[in-house]
Each structure stands twice: as C-alpha cells, then as structure tokens.
Amino acid sequence: MNKLIFRKFSLDILNFFFIASFSITFIVWIIQAVNLLDLVSDDGHSLDVYFYYVSLGLPKIFSKTIIFVFFISIFYVINKYNNSNELIVFWNNGIQKIKFINFILFFSLFFLILQLVLNLFIVPKSQNLGRLYIKESNIDFFPKLISEKKFINVVKNLTIFVEDYQKDGRLKKIYINEKIDNGSKIIVAENGSIIKKNKKYVLRLFNGGITNINEDNTYTLNFSKTDYDLSNFSTKTITDQKIQELDSIVMINCIKELYQNKELHKSKFINSPDNEACHERTVKSLGEELYKRLILPFYILVISLIAASLVIEPKSKYFLKLHKINIFLTGIVIIIISQISIKYFLNSINFSYLILSLPIILVLIYYFVLLIFTKFKLSYL
C-alpha cells in the first residue's frame, strides 16, 4: 500500500515537473529564437540553418530551469495534498514524516543525475554542434541581403556596394572591398549577377578591374569577365569555440595538466600540443564552468528538503500561510545563492573550498533541523 501511495505522489510531481518545464522552456526558447533572427536578417543564413541552430539550444534552456521547476513542483504537489487533506493518507498508513522527507530526498537524486548528464555531456555537445553547423553552413540567404546603394558586410573582411539591383538579379556598378593580409583588394565592375555554382553563391562580374593594395606596392588588373567566389569567406557569426561548448573531459584534463605543471596561479593556460582547447583559457573561467556543471546540480538536494519541510506545520493555523511563504522564499533564496556563488568561486583557495562544500553542508544542516522538528526516532530512518 505504501508503495502505491508513494508511486502516485512521485507521478504527480513528475507530471507537474514536465508540464511546467516544457512550458517554461518553450517560452524561453521562443524569446531566444526571436533574438537570434539576425542569423538570417544580418548574417545571411537560410531558415533551415536558423531553425536547426536555435533547436540545439533547447537542452541548455531545459537544464537551466530544472532546479527552479523541481522546487516549484514539490512545493505545489505537497501544498495541494495538504489543502485536500491527502497527506492524512500517508500518516494513517503508518508513514512517518521523516520517512516522507527521506523519500523526497531520495527522489531528488533522479533529477540530480538528470542535470549532471545534461550539464556534463548533452548541453556542451549540442552547443558545440550548433557552432560547427553555423561555421560550416553556406550564406544561403545572401542574394536577399543585397540592397541598392547600401554597403553590405554580412561576411568577415568583405564589403560590397551595388548601385543598382534589378528584379532579374542583375547588378550594376559594383564595388567590392576585400581585406587581405597587410592590405586589401578592391574590385570594381560595370555589371554582374549572383549565380549558384556547385551549391555555392558566386558573383559573376563583367567589365571591371582588380586593384591589389599592400604595404610594398599597388597593381591593377582589368577583366572582361570573372567569377568572385563567396564561399571563401566565413560568416560574421561568432564561430570560435566558447568555454560553454568545451567537452567536460577536456576541461578536466586542462585543470589536471595545470595542476601537474604547477601553473594554477597563472592567468592563462600554457601552450600544449596535446590540448589545443586549453589555449588562452583562464583558470577562473574553466573553474567556474566546471563548478556550474558539477557542483550546482547538488543544490537540488537542498531545495528538495526545503520544499519537503511543508509537511511540518506550525502549531497555530494562523501562521500556516506565513509558514508556506517562508518556505517558498527560502527555496528561492537558496537558488539565488547557488547562482551568486559562481562569481566568488576561485577568489581565494579557502573560500573556494567553502563554496564547493556549501550544498552538502546545507543538506546536512537542513536535514538535521528536520530531524529535530519531526521528533524522529532511529527506527523511523
């Protein structure tokens, strides 16, 4: 009977959690997708590239919302059971409050493992896939970005100006400025058109000249017809690998390498042919990222105990509402503290040890307080 009661309770939490997570994740994803529309409007990528890229951001958004939604889920379900007197079913079946709290703590381990898997493997992988996809994608929307009498610079080191852009795709009075090493290349053409060649866009130019300018000299070549390949240029979208996109194992190896070389006090990583991803990464940035992936999920255990404390009601019913508000605010404060702690991590060695152990310390303290308030006996555990 007790198993059936706990199964229904856990299913109610899971149902609320996944409905709330889906709703919040979808809303945040829509907002983020709107903010990333410049991938099409400014950077010239196709709609297929855009939707694939923004879809890869879903795991990150979901991972960010887990701790908050999990707290709300437990708080809501316990409060609902309490208001409908369903908690009496637990007590009438001989389930002690400390056993009820123990079940919630044990149940929270599932969400802890879920967030660890997301943080350590799925989110970095999806973020890196998005970056690589953008980096390797063609500027498929380029023709629609060309405007008359406007300087277009949708790709790095390239500026294009067109005097007249006709509906049939023909261009007139074309100016191209390409930045090259220690100089630039200027191309001027009377007319031209944008064509697709081998699934890539090129500018076919007629009747013009190419001027190469560098530190030593300047020379000009005339042409009657030439193709200017746009595939040699990369998008203006940031394609360098961010620290959030690094593989977790690689990051741990970076820290391990520094520790072995006694370089932890330096601000930047040593150059290593075996670990190129570590180059120019600061100890603090890597430490903060690993802290977010490995330590922050353990705050799930803390907030599960805070939400579970709803079963301990004040003696006076007049303070019941205040009691619920205090528990809710305590949970929110703990979540905020978990996020603030990132900024103070690695500021000093001793303080870093405290921050690392803080979630476990909070779990032990809060659990001990709950044991006192439930007037536990060893047989209950």
Image (spheres, rainbow, N blue to C red):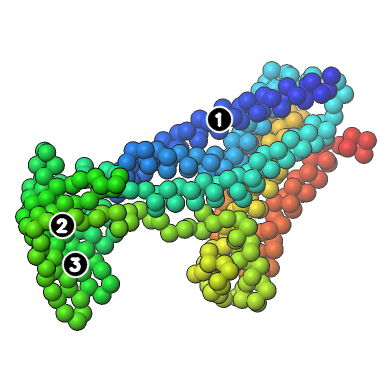
Judged by depth in the image, the label closer to the viewer, 1 or 2, is 2
The residue at the point 74 percent across, 51 percent down is 360
From this view, report whether residue 329 is shown above or below residue 3.
below
Crowding at mark 3 (Cα within 10 Å: few <14, some 14-19, many 20+)? some
User: Type of residue at label 1?
Assistant: Ala
Q: From the viewer's perspective, is 155 left or right of 290?
A: left
Crowding at mark 1 (Cα within 10 Å: few <14, some 14-19, many 20+)? some
Element carrying mark 3 = strand
The alpha-carbon separation of the residues under discs 1 and 2 comes to: 58 Å
The residue at the point 61 percent across, 33 percent down is 72
Q: Dot 3 corresponds to which residue? A: 185
User: Type of residue at label 2?
Assistant: Thr
The alpha-carbon separation of the residues under discs 3 and 1 comes to: 55 Å
Circles 3 and 1 in contact, beta carbons < 8 Å: no
Q: From the viewer's perspective, is 146 left or right of 347?
A: left
User: Residue 178: x and y, percent?
Assistant: 21, 63
From this view, report whether residue 14 is shown above or below residue 64.
above
Q: Is residue 85 visible?
A: yes
Circles 1 and 2 in contact, beta carbons < 8 Å: no
Crowding at mark 2 (Cα within 10 Å: few <14, some 14-19, many 20+)? some
User: Residue 296: x and y, percent?
Assistant: 63, 50
The circle on residue 20 is 1
The circle on residue 226 is 2
